[in-house]
Amino acid sequence: QVVNGLMDRPDWAAALRMPLGILPCGSGNALAAAINFHAGLAPALGLSLLQNCAVLLCRGTPSPLDLVSVTTASGTRVFSFLSVAWGLVADVDIESERLRRLGPARFALGTAARLLALHTYRGRLGDTPSDGATEVHGVTSRHGDAPGPASPPKDASPPSPAGGPVDDLLVPLGQPVPPSWVTLEGDFVLVLAIYQSHLGAELVAAPRARPDDGLIHLCYVRAGVSRGALLRALLAMTRGGGGGGTDAAAGPPLSRVPARAFRLEPLTPRGVLTVDGERVEYGPLQGQIHRGLARLLT
């Protein structure tokens, strides 16, 4: 709400120069955990994480923070600092809301329940990958031969934002993605676009992600994965917080692709989409990262 409130101001560019401070008071605390992680401090939870973040606030060192502009099917545009989720991650986030009084334990209980009743969702994922991302995808289709970063066709107009920077890598949701994008269609257990290292205080989803690396880290799991393999991948993420940035969950069944923009088109009629843990309208959406758009006290 704070970020999007600043973006609604006519002087949004100046307003975003004001550094934002984070004190963890919720059950997720992903951004606070990411700040703690990149400050080189030991993994912490609860009061210890709060104390670490308070010390960092007192030091008052401003650092750039990437924001992702996310546009939904109705044309609503919001700015996100953490993630866009569909499938398992979004289901657990929303379904466990009734267990919020349990704190972070609600995510573990919600994940266990969802693993027992594992759902798959059909959809299409498109992105502007970094060099070499085609091999990371595994099974992909590339429309056209243009190498390097993608850009929209010259005869297409990017979405016209009400405020904030222009999404120059995107075309309107009603149009096909640019020819040089990589697209992947199939059945998924989860799709997660994340731009911080942590998805929760104990969950390191993208240990190589930095708050200002200018990348969206697209993570997905295809249908057909066993519950055991999926559980092992999720447990590896919890161990990533103590590994000094090692990617414990890399490799099957979890695929990761670095991108600067993406489009997600759910083809399953019903499901849950979240932006920064908050439910948004279900349907096609797309996003583009804007490097260093905001500032964060780290």
Image: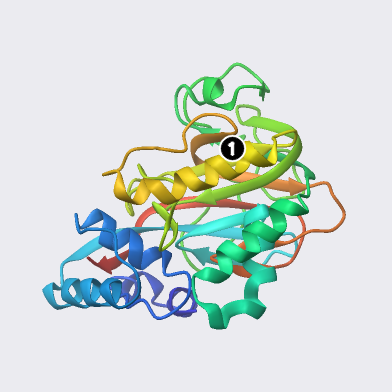
Q: Position of residue 33 (x, y in %)?
A: 34, 63
Q: Residue at x 56, y 20 (%)?
A: 146
Image side of residue 200 versus residue 15, left or right: right
Single out the residue that lies furthest toward the bottom: 101
Name which quarter of the figure residue 252 lies in. Answer: top right
Q: Quadrant of the C terminus?
A: bottom left
* Front in this rendered view, residue 120 or 175: 120
Image side of residue 146 versus residue 290, left or right: right
Q: Position of residue 125 (x, y in %)?
A: 68, 39
Name which quarter of the figure residue 67 lies in. Answer: bottom left
Label 1 crowding class (10 Å Cα cut-off): few <14, some 14-19, many 20+?
Answer: many
Image side of residue 266 versus residue 9, left or right: right
Looking at the rendered structure, the secondary structure element under dot 1 is: strand
Single out the residue that lies furthest toward the left: 59
Q: Image height check: is 21 above or below 292?
A: below
Q: Is residue 162 visible?
A: no
Single out the residue that lies furthest toward the top: 145
Looking at numbered disc 1 in the image, what kind of residue is underneath it? Answer: Asp
Q: Image height check: is 282 above or below 249?
A: below
Q: Is residue 75 visible?
A: yes
Q: Image height check: is 239 above or below 32?
A: above
Q: Residue at x 73, y 61 (%)?
A: 272
* Front in this rendered view, residue 235 or 12: 235
Q: Position of residue 122 (x, y in %)?
A: 80, 42
Q: Residue at x 58, y 56 (%)?
A: 84
* Front in this rendered view, residue 67 or 95: 95
What residue is shown with label 1? 127
State the count of labels.
1
